[in-house]
Image (cartoon, coloured by chain):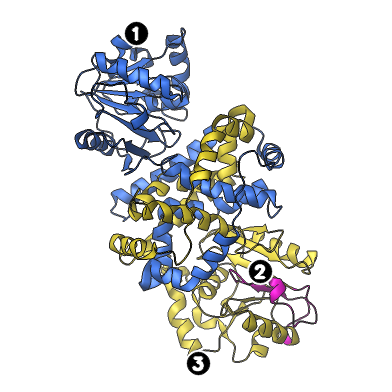
Chain colours: A yellow, B blue
Amino acid sequence: MLGPSKKDTETRITLIGTGTIGLSFAAFHLTHLDSPSQLTIYDTRTDVAEYVQESLPKFFTGEDKSSLPSFSEVKIAKSLEEAVAHASIVQESGPEKAAFKLNLWAEVEKYAPKDALLWSSTSGIPASQQNCKMQDTSRVLVVHPYNPPHIMPLLELVPSPETSEKVIERTQEFWRARGRVPIHIKKETTGFVANRLAFALLREAVHLVDQGVVSVEELDQIVQTSMGPRWAVAGPFKSYHAGGGPAGLEGFFKNIGGTVQDCWADSGTPNVGDGWEEKVFKDAKDSYGTVDIGERDRITRRLLQVIEEEKSRGANTK
Amino acid sequence: MLGPSKKDTETRITLIGTGTIGLSFAAFHLTHLDSPSQLTIYDTRTDVAEYVQESLPKFFTGEDKSSLPSFSEVKIAKSLEEAVAHASIVQESGPEKAAFKLNLWAEVEKYAPKDALLWSSTSGIPASQQNCKMQDTSRVLVVHPYNPPHIMPLLELVPSPETSEKVIERTQEFWRARGRVPIHIKKETTGFVANRLAFALLREAVHLVDQGVVSVEELDQIVQTSMGPRWAVAGPFKSYHAGGGPAGLEGFFKNIGGTVQDCWADSGTPNVGDGWEEKVFKDAKDSYGTVDIGERDRITRRLLQVIEEEKSRGANTK
């Protein structure tokens, strides 16, 4: 796991929902809390205890068996009240339905300590649509991970206009202390930032495959051998700022702004349901069948460790 | 350097143009040819010999001094005829002007061996606009690197409709034998593929910074801690195909196609010259000043070495 190994002996974390995101958060916290008993999981599924015992170890493949946490010490709550009554942090990763989250936070507010941080993992329902039934609307914010959160460093913190500064700061401190990268998104933009960026590239990718310029696999190879590794080290602005020499990003646009604009003007704008799906889905299936996520995550972790190492040696990875 | 260490004793490579791209290609070839004397450089600048001697070593920072090639053995040609007369490969990285390339290839054709491969590094002028004055229009194709080519594995091979299959195949074989990833682009699309994809994401990035959603540096941090490292290992299609579980990319769109479409429908479409420049350029300059490209490239190389290692151990990085 990335991040400092200093254990946290006081925080009591409650996770609501045991989908992939919820369990991946659980795996992350289990490597940063002093004791698994500081973690509580709540889900309405009837077999939750068995399910968690069976599923959680899968997030620790490749790690030293002797250092695995004692999964059976994780608390499984029988009611929402029991789940949140002593929590310092409550993160929900439940169904992506506004009604569910609305009602959940109204209930959580009744039972949780007044200073508990209340986070939603949602990828699309802004905090301002989740807090409407609460007495204190300043408490909830979105803490959107890049999947899977036990590996990927990014957390998008998306407060509503009512979320208090104090809550945002405490949330940032929590993640920074654990070696993660919480970024405060200033406006509740549709899809937040990471997905908007990735989907913008995906849209052009769909267009190019649909037009027969490259195949799905060729397109992936292109990204994997160019902007993927580049952007792991220096994001797009930093890269193009460097590409412009001493004149920076301005120099870059002076030099090749014409080409950039030609590409923008020529870019495809396929929509979901436009008819490209059959070809693109089939191409992906034929190329990849079922992807070995374990291998992908293992290699990703190695890359992140290199970057982490460089950072701790003082490399300027900002 | 990446790629197999087996040296090439026969190929004679001529590089035309000594800009950053030309010299970076020279650095790559010097680590793969048996002798620096197999490399010829031609440029019309009068101080070319001194300039090359002074500049080439800068591409070898961080490497074992004792294993550096003997730069003085690189041939500096005094005329185009001398430069290409014995070449098996000619790659031009000259000015991005169609007229320059048109005339260059007509001249090269007069003097180069009939079976020499003729490549252009252009990022924007298609082979079909470069070959018009040639007797044999089937010889030229674009071999567009991702900068800098002595580090980044990708080469976009963009033939004109007239380029022969044999030329494309020989070009692919050359790069594959050196551990590089040559991708055959099937149509002469504006900007080819890598830049189109990167610029699509850049456009949304410009929009989000212009709207005040995040800063330049925050946006870069988001990319560096999420899709950057992810896409270094598995490109966008493969990642979303994996994200869809057993139903693959189709499952992914079934689950969150709505969110994808919401982002697409809400995406920004700034154009060059629309007025976002002042803010975005200033933000980049304030954040980064002058970027240390050496550090970026050194870390990028470490990441690529991890991926190379994993590949040679049999990891499925396709």
Q: Quadrant of the N terminus of chain B?
A: top left
Q: Amino acid at mark 3?
A: Thr
Mark 2 and mark 3: Cα distance apart in space: 27 Å
Relative to A227, does residue A3 appear above or below in the rendering? below
* Mark nearer the viewer, 2 or 1: 1
Q: Are marks 2 and 1 in contact (CB under 8 Å)?
A: no
Residue A125: say if magenta.
yes
- The main secondary structure of the magenta stretch is loop
Chain ID at mark 1: B
Residue extent of the magenta highlight = A111-139
Task: Compute the Cα span from label 2 to label 1.
Answer: 64 Å
Does B314 sit above or below residue A30?
above
Q: Decide: marks 2, 3 in contact (CB < 8 A)?
A: no
| Callout 2 amino acid | Val
Q: Which residue is mark 2?
A: A142
Residue drawn at (58%, 46%) of the image = A311
Q: Is residue A228 inside the magenta stretch?
A: no
Q: Chain of mark 2?
A: A
Q: Quadrant of residue B2?
A: top left
Is residue B59 at least partly visible in the picture? yes
Q: Earlier in the sequence, mark 2 or mark 3?
A: 3
Residue ID for mark 1 = B79
Considering depth in this image, is A274 or A68 the residue closer to the camera?
A: A274
Q: Where does the image place residue A148, in percent across and percent down from the top left?
A: 50, 66
Chain designation of label 3: A
Residue type at numbered disc 1: Ser
The residue singled out by tag 3 in the image is A46
Displayed quadrant of residue B7:
top left
Residue A304 can be seen, yes or no: no
Have a look at marks 2 and 1 and say if they share a chain.
Answer: no
* Local crowd size for mark 2, using a 10 Å CA cut-off: few (<14), some (14–19), many (≥20): many
Q: Are marks 1 and 3 on the same chain?
A: no
